[in-house]
Image (cartoon, rainbow, N blue to C red):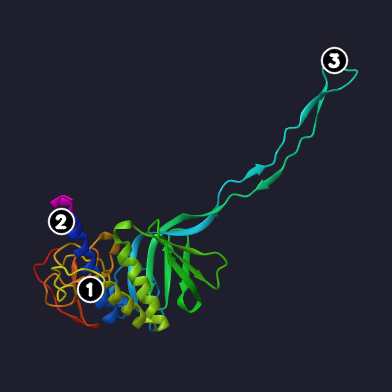
Amino acid sequence: MSKRNDRKEYELAEHHHAMLVEQLDAAKTFMGGDISEVPGCPLQVRAGERVFLSVEGAFLVEPRRGAGHWEGRSQGISVHVPGTKSMRYRVGANRGHFMQGEEVPTPIDNGTFVITNQRAVFIGGKQTREWAWSKLLGFTHSTDAPWTAIAVSNRQKTSGVLYDKEHEDRIRFLLDLAVARFTGTTDTLIAQIEAELATLPETDTDTHTGTGTVAIGAMPSDAAPPTVASAAWFSDPGGRHQLRYWDGSKWTEHVSDRGVQAVDPIAGTSP
């Protein structure tokens, strides 16, 4: 194996380790943010509702049936009618039976996906969907595409949300964390992350700077937060606090340390 491949594998391992460290810290400390700290979020929150993530550019995914087809159809045979020159009739024709097309997950609308401690909501140009955690039957992160299917007891068919591949780890983790907070299973989530961390080889990642964020994803503190998370928290680029809020175009004065929020203006810092 070449040195270039060795270096690439090491960087991937280091990235994964840093991401897990951030997730672990967030699982231990983050309880969601106030809606006032999420500018542009279209959700009307309820009493006690805390926002974990507001993601623009998501797609609502629902099952749609594809084209059907006939099976067992037979044209039969053509038989000459006696006493005529050219008249014929067909016998044995069979239309068979119609097979409906399979239902496949299909993106049907584009909009904003919001995760809170009470529910997940999609707000699009044409459709709105809500998945209340109190009615949650289960959810599944797809293994072959960046989308999550969510089943709730008040909806007959399972629907879900499609997001971009680059930030799927962050979005999936925040969904896991929000549900864990609601169901009281945060300790289980923490144990799972710690177990995965224990299986990884040691890296040079500084666990003290790999602090948790609302938008988890091993994002360097001096890098611009991704546009997919236009309303989210990230590691404070100035290093004075654990988290600082990014409003989609600039860093704000809102900061957070171990779940305690405060105000600290940041001057002369660009993403």
Residue highlighted by disc 3: 85
Residue at the far right: name it: 83
Q: For numbered disc 2, what is the local secondary structure?
A: helix
Residue 213, can we see it?
no
Quadrant including the C terminus: bottom left
* Picture coordinates of residue 175, whole percent (x, y): 37, 71
* Picture coordinates of residue 29, whole percent (x, y): 26, 82
Query: Is tag 3's residue or tag 2's residue first in the polypeptide sequence?
Result: 2
Q: Which of marks 3 and 2 is in front?
A: 2
Q: Distance between the residues labelled 3 and 2?
A: 84 Å
Residue found at x 15% / y 50%: 2
Q: What residue type is labelled 2?
A: Arg
* Picture coordinates of residue 105, whole percent (x, y): 49, 56
Left or right relative to 249: residue 184: right
Label of residue 7 in the image: 2
Q: Nearer the viewer, residue 248 or 180?
A: 180
Residue highlighted by disc 1: 21
Q: Nearer the viewer, mark 3 or mark 1?
A: 1
Q: Which amino acid does label 1 sit on?
A: Val
**Main SS category, magenta section:** helix
Chain part drawn in magenta: 1-5
